[in-house]
């Protein structure tokens, strides 16, 4: 199986990618807010756990992405749901372009923002492809333990990762996502980076 894995420089998504690398071939999708070098370094760490000869990273400018998304008319409290929905839809677009079969995320079941059960349901409402969440039953302590063991924790915690677009009071009980999100996703540009062999890697 081949899948698109959403990856950030945070703690969770490198762990979910690590878990799925043992099961399938991954391509990686990153919405960049200034830490793409850290993501490249994380992928270099994860390379040791993968049998893949090529690691490919798809990079989207997160600021431009949100700017386009905000053209839609939705309440500010629903920003996280709309953002995550559009990320998943973009990942689905990459699945179709690169012949992948599923989407992998670093979601764990939470009580706020995009990770409540009802919000996850809303975020998947426009998708055709399945979403795999390897961390769904883990708590933060367990995720951190894995991150430390595999060597990504130090990189992830170099700087605090917070989203500047997150609302003060995000909706937690789901919402109906406008189908126009797909039009935004179809217009977004991206860059494809292929990690070179370890001996030539320069970050």
Image (cartoon, rainbow, N blue to C red):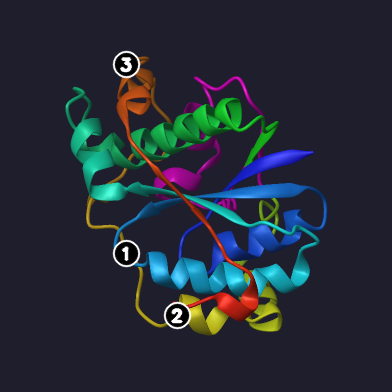
Mark positioned earlier in the residue sequence (3 or 1) = 1
Q: Secondary structure at mark 2?
A: loop
Q: Give the distance between the C-alpha atoms of the residues marked 3 and 1, in whole angstroms.
A: 27 Å
Name the residue: 55% across, 71% down.
42
The residue closer to the viewer here, 189 or 159, is 189
The residue closer to the viewer here, 43 or 194, is 194
> Image quarter for residue 190?
top left
Category of crowding for the residue at label 3, using alpha-carbon neighbours closer than 10 angstroms: few (below 14), some (14–19), many (at least 20): few
Q: Give the distance between the C-alpha atoms of the residues marked 3 and 2, in whole angstroms.
A: 36 Å
Name the mark on residue 162.
1
Mark positioned earlier in the residue sequence (3 or 2) = 2
Query: Which region shows up in magenta?
Result: 104-133
Residue 68 spot, x, y in % from top left: 21, 32
**Which residue lies under the disc numbered 2?**
157
Q: Is 112 in the magenta?
A: yes
**Which residue lies under the disc numbered 3?**
180
Image position of 80 (left or right of 156): left
Q: Comparing marks 3 and 1, which lies closer to the viewer?
A: 3
Category of crowding for the residue at label 2, using alpha-carbon neighbours closer than 10 angstroms: few (below 14), some (14–19), many (at least 20): few
Tell me if I can see residue 94 in this picture.
yes
Name the residue: 48% across, 75% down.
156
Q: Secondary structure at mark 1?
A: loop
Residue 85 to residue 152: above or below: above
Mark positioned earlier in the residue sequence (1 or 2) = 2
Category of crowding for the residue at label 1, using alpha-carbon neighbours closer than 10 angstroms: few (below 14), some (14–19), many (at least 20): few
Residue 39 spot, x, y in % from top left: 48, 66
Name the residue: 63% across, 57% down.
55
């Amino acid at each position: 199986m081949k899948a698109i894995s959403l990856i950030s420089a945070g703690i969770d998504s490198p762990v979910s990618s690590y878990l799925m690398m043992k099961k399938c071939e991954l391509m990686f999708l990153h919405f960049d807010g200034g830490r793409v070098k850290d993501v490249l370094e994380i992928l270099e760490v994860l390379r040791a756990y993968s049998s893949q000869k090529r690691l490919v990273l798809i990079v989207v400018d997160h600021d431009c992405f949100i700017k386009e998304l905000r053209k839609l008319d939705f309440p500010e409290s629903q920003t996280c749901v709309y953002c995550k929905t559009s990320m998943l839809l973009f990942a689905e677009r990459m699945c179709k372009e690169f012949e992948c079969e599923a989407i992998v995320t670093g979601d764990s079941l939470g009580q706020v923002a995009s990770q409540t059960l009802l919000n996850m349901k809303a975020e998947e409402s426009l998708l055709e492809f399945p979403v795999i969440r390897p961390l769904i039953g883990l708590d933060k302590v367990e995720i951190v333990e894995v991150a430390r063991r595999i060597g990504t924790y130090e990189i992830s915690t170099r700087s605090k990762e917070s989203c500047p677009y997150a609302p003060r009071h995000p909706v937690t009980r789901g919402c109906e996502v406008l189908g126009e999100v797909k039009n935004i996703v179809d217009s977004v540009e991206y860059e494809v980076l292929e990690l070179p062999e370890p001996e030539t890697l320069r970050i």
